[in-house]
Image (cartoon, rainbow, N blue to C red):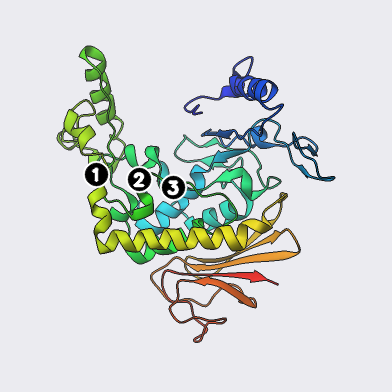
Amino acid sequence: MRFTGWKSDELKPDILTELAEAIRAKLGVDRLIHLVLENDQNAAHYLTSLESRRDAGATAEGDQRKTPRLYDAQWNDDIHHALHVLITGEADGYYCDYSEQPIRHLGRCLAEGFSYQGERSRHRNNAPRGEPSRDLPPTSFVSFLQNHDQVGNRAYGERINKLAEPKALKAALAILLLAPSPPLLFMGEEFGADTSFLFFCDFDGELAAAVTDGRRNEFARFERFSSPNTRASLPDPNAETTFTRSKLDWRSLDEPTHQFWLTFYHDLLTLRRDTIVPHLRNLSGRSGSFTLGESNSLAVDWKLAGEVTLRLIANLSPDSVTPPAAPTRRLIYSTIEGMTEKLDTGKMPPWSVVWFLHP
């Protein structure tokens, strides 16, 4: 469900509230319902929970979970934007809100959900954006590095592997795929698809012309598209070639580069399923905290079920840095080749990520 560009809670009655309540009342009696929201306002109140109640059909005593009041989770645009700035250096358009201290925005997203929790947004004419989200569990926020909006709304539909160096991309994904928040993958991302995904539609007449003109005019605020001639060269959303260029090339799966990314995603998601997910049940709010280090480095700790602490230490910069936190005993993943339990040099190399589980 996608409601963007306006505040749904200004409508009376609120359509998002009515929709969620109707679905849960009619369908949630004898089945488990998952509702995931996209809301540009970072409206955390849609994700708050009622008191625990027994799952429908539960037979074991104490088999309970937090039942969402309205929505289970929301796409977290903030974490996408922060990571995008860190690994590409882009700062145009809405990325300007994350261009100052992008590592802090990332840390807050990982530990607290949204980065904008009421702070003013430069991109939105200095208007406040968001609501406090620290009291929500990390499982309330869906993280991603690509989706149909962030790729398709680009002028030329470039995927992230066309914009970032492989080492930087690998580090960003090693964070997203193992952090407690559920990751979202865009079609073809799992094998590093490098085909464009353009903005396309199939309209006729005046509507088609309006969409084409509107599509080109929306890029006027971006410096590299300030010229009308440059904007006129953008792919026409109504052209059939725009659609056909957006199809996945399944034959590319046989190429070594795509095999590498397929194995990379598979291995990290397997590690997530086997090692991290078992500790995420009944996760509460205020479970995460973060510390910033030199350059674009950070450490994040999460208190998980069973008195387990999950620790991330990451260096998202092109320089070697002293890590902002000490490693813990059990290393579960590292992008640093040959690392066992500690950093041999005391420094983290560029674009490196390590994960620990304690005890």
Which of the two residues, 172 or 338, is positioned nearer the viewer here? 338
Residue under pointer 1: 224
Farthest residue to the right: give it: 61
Farthest residue to the front: give it: 59
Real-space Cα separation, disc 3 to disc 2, in angstroms = 24 Å
What kind of element bears circle 1? helix
Residue 92: give its label: 2
Please report contact status of discs 2 and 1: CB closer than 8 Å, yes or no: yes
Residue 128 pos. (x, y %): 57, 36
**Left or right of 150, for residue 330:** right
In percent of the image, x 61 and y 21: which residue is there?
19
Residue 185: give its label: 3
Circle nearer the N terminus (3, 2):
2
Q: Nearer the viewer, mark 3 or mark 1?
A: 3
In percent of the image, x 51 and y 67: which residue is there?
314
Circle nearer the N terminus (3, 1):
3
**Left or right of 239, for residue 188:** right
Real-space Cα separation, disc 3 to disc 1, in angstroms = 29 Å
Which of the two residues, 4 or 18, is positioned nearer the viewer here? 18
Disc 1 marks a residue whose amino acid type is Arg
In percent of the image, x 34 and y 47: which residue is there?
188
Residue 160 pos. (x, y %): 34, 52
Real-space Cα separation, disc 2 to disc 1, in angstroms = 9 Å
Crowding around mark 1 (Cα neighbors within 10 Å: few <14, some 14 to 19, many 20+) is few
